[in-house]
Amino acid sequence: MPDNLLKDPYNIIITGVGGQGNVMASKLLGNMLVGRGYYVTIGETFGASQRGGSVMSHMRISGKSIWSPQIPEHKADVIIAIEPVEGIRVLARYGNLTVKLLCNSHPVYPSSVIRGEAYYPSPEEIETSVRNMAPDTTFIDATGEAVSLGNPILAGVVLLGTLCGTGALPLNRKDFHESIANRLENQQVELNMKAFDTGFRLLKN
Amino acid sequence: MSYLTDNQNKDYLLMGNEAIARGALEGAVSVASGYPGTPSSEIIEALSSVAKERNLYVEWSINEKVALEVAAAASFAGLRAMCVMKQNGVNVASDFLLHLASSGTRGGMILVACDDPGALSSVNEGESRTFARLVEIPLLEPGDFQEAKDITKWAFELSEEIRNLVMIRSVTRMSHASGNVRYGQLPDTHARANFRFDGPLSDPETGPVVSMIVGASELQHGPQQEKIKKAAEIFEDCPFNTYEGPEKPELLIITSSACNLYTREAISLLDVKDRVGILKLATTWPLPPKLMKRHLSCTDRILVVEEVLPILEENIKILAAEMAHEIGPKTFYGKNAGNIPSIGELNPDIVASALSSILDVRYETGSERFAEEAMLLVETMAPVRGLTMCPGCPHRASLWSIHNALEMDGRKGFVCGDIGCYVAGVFPGGFNTVKTLHSMGSGSGIASGFGKFKQFGMDQPVVAVCGDSTFFHAAMPALANAIHHKSPFTLMILDNRGAAMTGFQPHPGTPVNAMGEETPSLDIAEICRAMGAKVEIRDPFDLEETQQTIHHLIEHQEGTKVLILRQACALSPERKDKPKYKMEVDEEVCLGENCGCNRFCTRIFACPGLLWDEEKGVSKINDIICVGCGVCADICPAGAIKREEVV
Ligand code: SF4
Ligand code: SF4
């Protein structure tokens, strides 16, 4: 039996916009946890992902069994938002007052906003209203960090590092290394480790 | 070596589709074929990735009907075969499917159909299960990821036992979800193929394999029905049909597939496991009557939880009616009674609400206040993400040019759309150019019809679009029809070199096949020319020339014309991460709201790689999103958007 979780099943949602590496982040996290002996169920919504649509991965982590690939409303324990407005959307449907929200502060504008038909809230507005709903929220410039590492796609990995830094899951740097070591090329492994460490440290400061 | 062919004694995290692929490998599959379609594509992809290693023959066929024919040939030659498609694909394959079910099979053969309840990535939420009953073949529905693997393996044995093909139905939340799977053994890979035909017509093992013999239904339809009866008998003891709950439940829930997982969660949410029993069926057609009778006898109230059409519900009701004198009257809950919605996909909350009203227990999803505030937050702060195309997508440029040319023409011309990323042409992201949209290849067929209505006074220019993969799949017969009947329309083939929407699977026009081997690529332009169409080829990124060409083609309404708009998809290996231009907006030159251009770049063209800088009132390039195609430079009438070639 693996270590006890804070709650069983422990529910994580990773959300963002197509092309932000959502699916990869959930796969990496899932593999780490299965490696640790847990049951993991992941439900992906990526139908329109290639075309800049909202994407969402629901993860259920359990010491006992598989769970539904869709998390019931308001039952998320952690929300990782690679895009802030997607974080708001998921928070509204699956969040609760005690949810832990890790939010990338970098926006991706919907086409309605680019066209000038819809309003995209300012960073301050997002921060105030989100904290009001979910006091345990951390904003991170994951995309900024990822760009300085050379590729914005690493934002998801930065956030995974942050998640592991919170201690919410029994996972460490070694688990992450194992989960990528045999799937990626050496150079990529190094880059991903850097992104993970950056995220991990961000929360410590 | 791939993790799919590993043999360690540990849990693997597999996508449902990968689990089906692994099940096929454990079940000694030799031949697998399919046509790409979400959510089914990863099964063939997984098998093609291990084809060499496992001595398989895997192909992406030209369409689903041919895919089924290729797989059937394998079965006739004694090999185990699998054919994979999404729900819409079964419609395409259905003509041959009916005949195949009638002729029967030899080597174990499985048809995997992946449905998409809620149409998350489809143009409809079609229901493939109806086909199993229609063509009288057994239907299996895995209830979790481990079962997706195990049932696939088992299905080959079942198929060989009844000598007919077996259908496995998955859904998006099974195919595209992942969970723990434990592997079984992989068999050796030395299958031999040989087609025997010397025996008498009536011998299923040695005779010719033919569908219904005219006027002699007893020769084939009779034996076919014996097969389905035999399947029902086997299903009585199928290890994948399970019951969990009290001996005499207050309510019996009968379910299958992903709904099994939603139902379990709903029972746990409401904490009613002492009151409710759950019969999870893997064998949903034909239903095993004795098993059903045992369970139906235990209670008076039955809830059926399933997605899309109430097929399971209706089949259970038929059995219950036939057995009424033995099992007594029942109250049914489900789709027909309105407890379960009749459209869209289900989830644990929907099942919990249904259970809560049937059992009269309260279901609270969370604090009401949180939910109310949350709704408000979404309304004010979370702008919707409409369907659009990727930054740098060649379809945006193509649709832009088509749109402009039709506007300029002024006779209310329109586009008959087709299936591919260019479905976005229905929406503002594709400039609302597409006015009809149905199935694969239908744009061309509909356009072929529209083109013929001059005698009724219709003079609107007619344009059809289709992708390169769609052209081969189903547009070719429609084009031949149009040319033969001199239907004056223009077919725009948006050739982005591969089935981009589903992940760049090869098709007859690409130089490699699913096995990664070099293959002759069929030249779309030459095919169209040989058919008798006037053919032009343009790069859609050259807006001016493209628009002029389109204008010219639609101006003269004679004969069927083809314009191939050739440019690789922005996500294709040849373009991904390789920007051609470095883009920049000259803020001095951009006139912003005052330029009289109606902010063309952002308001109308609206590539997601562009931004509107509210403060400065000028356009801006979003460096993280822009892929440097350079097209927007030609959109700006003021010449404010500059491109510089990346060297
Ligand atoms: S160059 Fe212009 S049109 Fe092309 S991707 Fe960048 S912003 Fe979009
Ligand atoms: S970039 Fe060009 S098209 Fe866009 S607002 Fe400025 S002047 Fe107008």
Image: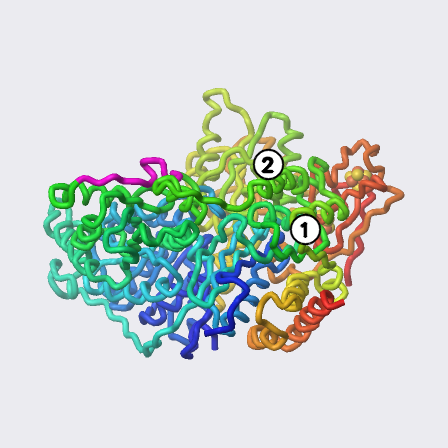
Secondary element at tag 2: helix
Confirm whether the magenta stretch covers residue B332. yes
Q: Which residue is located at x 49 percent, y 70 percent?
A: A34
Q: Which residues are magenta?
A: B329-342
Q: On the rendered structure, is B363 left or right of B491?
A: left
Q: Which residue is located at x 27 percent, y 44 percent?
A: B302
Check mark 2 vs ligand 1: CB closer than 8 Å? yes or no: no
Q: On the rendered structure, is B296 left or right of A134?
A: left
Q: Position of residue A139 (x, y in %)?
A: 72, 56
Amino acid tagged 2: Leu
What's the mark number on residue A84?
1
Q: Quadrant of residue A57?
A: bottom right
Q: Position of residue A152 (x, y in %)?
A: 70, 61
Q: Residue furthest top?
A: B457
Q: Nearer the viewer, residue A144 or B379?
A: B379
Secondary element at tag 1: helix
